[in-house]
Image: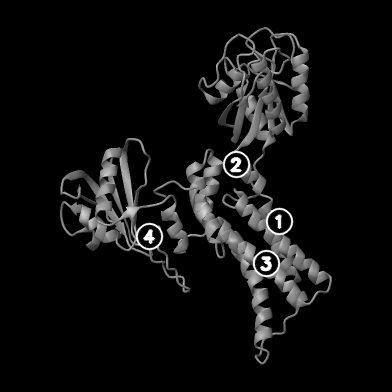
Amino acid sequence: MNQTPDSEGQSAAFDTIAAIATGSGPSAIGIIRISGPGALAAVDKVFTPLRGKPMSQRPDRQLVLGRLTAPGGELVDQCMATVSRGPNSYTGEDTAELQCHGSPVVLHLGLESLFAVGVRQAQAGEFTKRAFINRRMDLTQAEAVVDLIDAETDRAAENAAAQLDGAIRRRTDGIYDSLTTICSHYHAVIDYPDEDIEPFVLESYAHTLADAGGEMERLLATFRRGSVMKSGVPCAILGRPNAGKSSLLNAILGYDRAIVTPIPGTTRDTVEERAVLGGVLLRMADTAGLRETDDPVERLGVARTRQAAEGAELVLAVFDGSAPETEEDRAVLAAAEKAPRSVLLCNKSDLPQLWTPSGAISISAKTGAGLDALEQAVAALFPQEESVPAGEILTNPRQADAVSRALDYIHAAGKAMTDGFPPDAVLTEVEGALSALGELSGRSVREDVTNGIFARFCVGK
């Protein structure tokens, strides 16, 4: 990819790319996306409107019916096309879309027609990368595109959509501008001593630094919630053999994922699935029953169970209320007590009950009774902070690292000021904070970091 950005923020120059922007399976509609300086010329060569002017002479965002043809003139599809000229397009370049019938064969034939007229295959994330380089979005907005595609809960989708709308940028722009004002004032006084510029008094900016630090602390504090929202909570389902762990997993998922039999020890390895319970995304691991056994394979499963319990943020401890309490049940209780969070579940409420652990929720994985109470319990363990607006929640380690480093620089600047260091020493720390914040948004970021971010994307985005 040949890239020639200039210092005035104008659109960078690229070759012309195309990719299928919809899923790989059959669908009602499939979209081929084209972007670059030759996009309009390329679409004119492969698409002929049924009536009127070619697409290059049509207004932006007008949907036109026509014929998509192969290099030899054979009809590929009767479809729709639309164009959007830069800089007012997704990528900031001239773009076009072919909205075809969603046959994978048709879409690939259409793509080959474009390749035949000089367009090349887009790389993963290249459309959004061009939007970033052409300053149509910042890095937090670009990352939000992937987060929105990957969102598994309503809250995750809401947060990603708001970030795509620029929520993080708006939150941090004020901090960045206030720090820039400090640096600009200092350098103006130093570089232009004969000009009538208000004297630089470092102490007058103490509140500015304190306010910036407070804002960044509040933003950084959202990262843990963002990690849970995006990646889910590691959750281990523990219990002795035949307590109903696999049945509980199947009941939560709504289908038979784990094998269920009346034979103790059926589950010999961890079975992992993701599910939303009480609005919380859980990375659930159904584990082998905790018990002493001479079976070498089952012993390995029990060892993995203990590892899963040690790494879990949440333990769902399942007990068979229809059978007497055992030493194995007491071992499960002990493991649950060590977990950061746990919910005790007394299963098989559809059968006569012989015991119930203190504080346990009565459920039946077979009938679904009590699962609503389980949902409420999980939701209560991971409360949502309504005071944090959607979009202002950090969702990945790169963002959190940039804010954390900026905050460290602000703290260092404040300490240097308190300790009586000269203004240039304080300003060095302030400039470090600006650089870190620049990495958050993409104002200043290494090429390898940028490439790593867009490598997460799929082709066509």
Query: Split into 4 quadrants, where in the image is the N terminus?
Result: bottom left
Q: Tell me if mark 2 has few (under 14), some (14-19) or many (20+) residues whose alpha carbon lies within 10 angstroms of its own.
A: many
Rounded to the nearest whole Å, what is the CA distance between mark 1 and mark 2? 19 Å
Residue beneath disc 1:
217
Rendered image quadrant of residue 433: bottom right
Percent of width and height locating residue 18: 33, 52
Answer above or below: position of 82 versus 285. Answer: below
Colour scheme of this structure image? one colour
Q: Amino acid at mark 3?
A: Gly
Rounded to the nearest whole Å, what is the CA distance between mark 4 and mark 2? 31 Å
Badge 1 vs badge 2, beta-carbon distance below 8 Å: no
Q: Amino acid at mark 2?
A: Met
Of the pair 122 and 148, the residue shown nearer to us: 122
Answer above or below: position of 73 versus 318. Answer: below
Circle number at residue 229? 2
Rounded to the nearest whole Å, what is the CA distance between mark 3 and mark 2? 30 Å
Helix, strand or loop at label 4? It is: loop
Residue beneath disc 4:
89
**Residue at 75% over, 79% down:** 201
Circle number at residue 235? none
Helix, strand or loop at label 1? It is: helix
Circle number at residue 432? 3
